[in-house]
Amino acid sequence: MQCKKIQLIEPDLDTANQMAGILALAGYQVIHSTSGREVLSGQDASITLISSELSDISMTDWIRRHQQSGSGRSAIAVVNQDQGLLAADAMKAGATDYLLRPFEPNQLLSLLRRVETLEKPMANIVAESWRSKQVLQLAHRAACTNATVLITGESGTGKEVLARYVHEHSSRSKAPFVAVNCAAIPESMLEAVLFGHMKGAFTGATQTQTGKFEEANGGTILLDEIAEMSPALQAKLLRVLQEREVERIGSHKTVKLDIRVVAATNQDLRVAVQKGIFREDLYYRLDVLPLHWPPLRERPEDILPLCRFFVQKYQEKSQCRLGEDAQGALLQYHWPGNIRELENIIQRALVMRHGDVITAQDLMLPMEHMNGQQSHRAMQECGHIEAKKKAEFQYIIDTLRQFGGNRTQTANALGVTTRALRYKLAAMREQGIDLQAVLGSAA
């Protein structure tokens, strides 16, 4: 098996030799440099360990330039125990994670294994940008604990996907994962759905029902859109989280819970607490390990890989690809609906396309969410396409008139098959062209 290459940028030779020895024993091949500038152009190593003690360039500047190069390789900041602020700056600059000195060998190797997990293809998750990799790295850390996780982010960013990632990388991965959308269930029913009920507990309770907390026992429960929960139910949820037990409606017996709770919301719960619509004590109970999915517009490196993922997911037998004009439009679009909107647009484009290449026209992106320059170009392009289409339609109509509406003769004159002509005529009808009125009874 080929050794994994690690780039080590460390000016202190004693420290470098110590780290290289640990890595070599673990089966890594180490490429060492004492200068950060020497390796700004990049090496073929997949992970870089960079020291905070560089003299020729600051660690954060190196990481920032490394990320701007678009290499996609992970960088780990190695900082001293008293350099907490520098570690935070490194993460903001684009580091995947950080390592505090002094460290034990197992801490270094464990960190590398977590980062390597992000380099492997993951089912249903696309993470090419450093922002996405940072979130997944934190999610991987969270998965190693039983602590409550709070996931925030705009609608459509993939909060449930991230919750499943935490579950699947935890010791609970073989147990149930139960997702509850608090906004999709009527308030009068949500308590019974979460906690369960006994037969006859209320009107319509014709049989005893297990709640979602009990269904998820031993595993993970996702409380999605938790900000939509009523204050009364928030108080009951707080007790469940504190006592780790649940009581069905109409019962006096409690059921002990061994469960991880993941909450998700597209709202700022701190603002909700200030407004008095969300309990402060519940907020602090949920906000143990916070994870934030950035909006898609802030991680553009993910856009085209996500598009290719959805093309592969939804295309049938034919092999489609994105044309250059489509790729340009996708990168210029603002994505107010995030990944959910992107998925829907790709599905629509696969239906609307006329060949194996998806064009910008097939995407049908709203002009108001393109940046100014791209919007102007796109509008010009659409104008040219529209003019070309009208000219083509008029040519077909003139040819049909020439042959008295005969489809076979018209197709031969146009140099297309009769089937292709039928598609063209159907497209003309969709555009509101009344062929009967244009051609008379021959149409």
Image (cartoon, grey):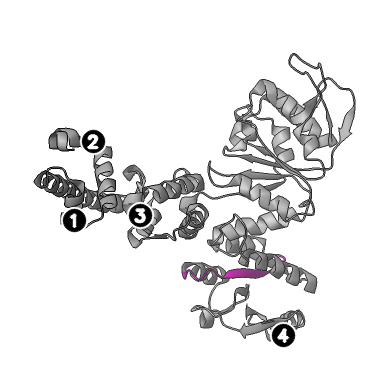
Front of the two marks 3 and 2:
2
Circle nearer the N terminus (3, 1): 3
Residues tagged 2 and 1 counted as in contact (Cβ below 8 A):
no
Residues tagged 2 and 4 counted as in contact (Cβ below 8 A):
no
Quarter of the picture containing the C terminus is top left
Q: Residue at x 28, y 52 (%)?
A: 420
Q: CA distance from mark 2 to mark 4?
A: 75 Å
Q: State the extent of the magenta-drawn residues as a range.
A: 69-82
Quarter of the picture containing the N terminus is bottom right
Front of the two marks 3 and 1:
1
Q: Residue at x 87, y 33 (%)?
A: 255
SS at badge 4: helix
Residue 432 is marked as 2
Q: CA distance from mark 2 to mark 1?
A: 25 Å
At label 1, which amino acid type do we have?
Asn
Residue that mark 4 sits on: 17
